[in-house]
């Protein structure tokens, strides 16, 4: 028996680009819809969203049904907060606000099995096929088919980028522009020179050490990110899609309503007003 192979890792190891889409809505149907459409990975969030383990489980099931990966951004907490998404059979975790090489090493120690780390072992959960995976195969396949990505979204870890990227067990570096822009005193200035430089440095460090270079941004800038060396990019979110769709509908509706109102007023004026 084998653990389900990571779609993202398979594509990246073949030199391809992997897509990612962020899911904010709590219902697993949101993940099912996005997975059906063909994204390589769905990004769930426990750092900012109050999604409990049952909700995360539903999203993972929905994605797995269509052979789509799930990456869970974990809260900065105990080792259990890091490994539970993996035990639910999420394909990877994203650890926010890594501040140093030692910080990254601590994450690896908690999330990787022997011989890389000392992650707590169970094997009776979904990722171990409910004990149906051979014990040693479970450890080996989990280290090989599940990814741990650390998020660089502060200026502090830039001094140790190469060291962080070189750590065994760290699969990739994810540049987070939002918090980084705030940290340099330029919130929302996506083209600020310091932000652009940092984004490039993160990609260069990841590629230099054969690791995943990941980031998030508008799909309209995807070619730019790929040109920097990024191969795993989150290019949208369900809340943005629904907002855009609803705003477009309401704009058109208001245009028709305004036109109808003008026509009604003109007709009433011609008829001498209301009767």
Image (cartoon, grey):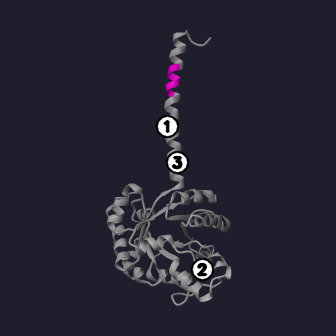
Locate residue 171, reporting x and y percent.
46, 78
Q: Nearer the viewer, residue 156 or 163?
A: 163
Which residue is disc 2 drawn over?
79
Does residue 151 appear anywhere in the picture? no
Locate residue 9, reporting x and y percent.
47, 73
Q: What separation in Å lies between label 3 and label 1 (alpha carbons)?
A: 12 Å
Within-10-Å neighbours for mark 2: few <14, some 14–19, many 20+: some
Locate residue 32, reporting x and y percent.
59, 59
Q: What separation in Å lies between label 1 and label 2 (alpha carbons)?
A: 48 Å
Our reading of the magenta stretch's main secondary structure is: helix
Per the image, label 2 sits on a secondary structure element best described as: helix
Q: Quadrant of residue 190?
A: bottom left
Q: Within the magenta stretch, is there residue 243?
A: no
Within-10-Å neighbours for mark 3: few <14, some 14–19, many 20+: few
| Mark nearer the N terminus (1 vs 2) | 2
Q: Nearer the viewer, residue 218 or 269?
A: 218
Q: Nearer the viewer, residue 91 or 253?
A: 91
Per the image, label 1 sits on a secondary structure element best described as: helix
Point 50% across, 76% down: residue: 148
Q: Within the magenta stretch, is there residue 262?
A: yes
| Mark nearer the N terminus (3 vs 2) | 2
Q: Which residues are magenta?
A: 258-263
Which residue is disc 1 drawn over?
251
- Which part of the image, by quadrant, shows the N terminus? bottom right
Point 41% across, 77% down: residue: 211
Mark 1 touches mark 2? (CB < 8 Å): no
Q: Which of the labelled discs sits on residue 243, or is there none?
A: 3
């Amino acid at each position: 028996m084998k653990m389900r192979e990571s779609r993202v890792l398979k594509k990246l190891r073949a030199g391809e680009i992997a897509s990612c889409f962020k899911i904010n809505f709590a219902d697993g149907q949101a993940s099912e819809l996005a997975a059906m459409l063909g994204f390589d990975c769905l990004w769930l969030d426990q750092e900012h969203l109050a999604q409990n383990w049952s909700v995360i489980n539903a999203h993972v099931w929905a994605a797995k049904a269509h052979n789509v990966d799930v990456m869970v951004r974990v809260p900065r907490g105990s080792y259990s907060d890091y490994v539970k998404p993996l035990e639910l059979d999420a394909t990877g975790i994203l650890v926010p606000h890594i501040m140093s090489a030692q910080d990254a090493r601590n994450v690896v120690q908690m999330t990787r099995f022997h011989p890389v780390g000392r992650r707590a072992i169970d094997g009776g959960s979904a990722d171990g096929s409910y004990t149906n995976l051979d014990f040693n195969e479970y450890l080996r396949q989990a280290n090989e088919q599940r990814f741990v990505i650390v998020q660089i979204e502060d200026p502090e870890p830039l001094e140790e980028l190469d060291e962080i990227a070189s750590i065994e067990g760290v699969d990739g570096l994810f540049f987070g522009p939002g918090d980084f822009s705030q940290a340099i005193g330029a919130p929302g200035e996506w083209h600020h020179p310091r932000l652009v430089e940092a984004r490039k440095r993160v990609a260069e460090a990841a590629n230099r050490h054969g690791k995943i270079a990941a980031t998030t941004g508008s799909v309209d800038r995807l070619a730019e990110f790929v040109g920097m060396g990024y191969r795993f990019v989150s290019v949208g979110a369900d809340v943005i899609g629904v907002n855009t769709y609803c705003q477009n509908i309401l704009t058109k509706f208001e245009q028709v309503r305004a036109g109808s109102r003008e026509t009604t007023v003109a007709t009433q004026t011609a008829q001498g007003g209301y009767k």
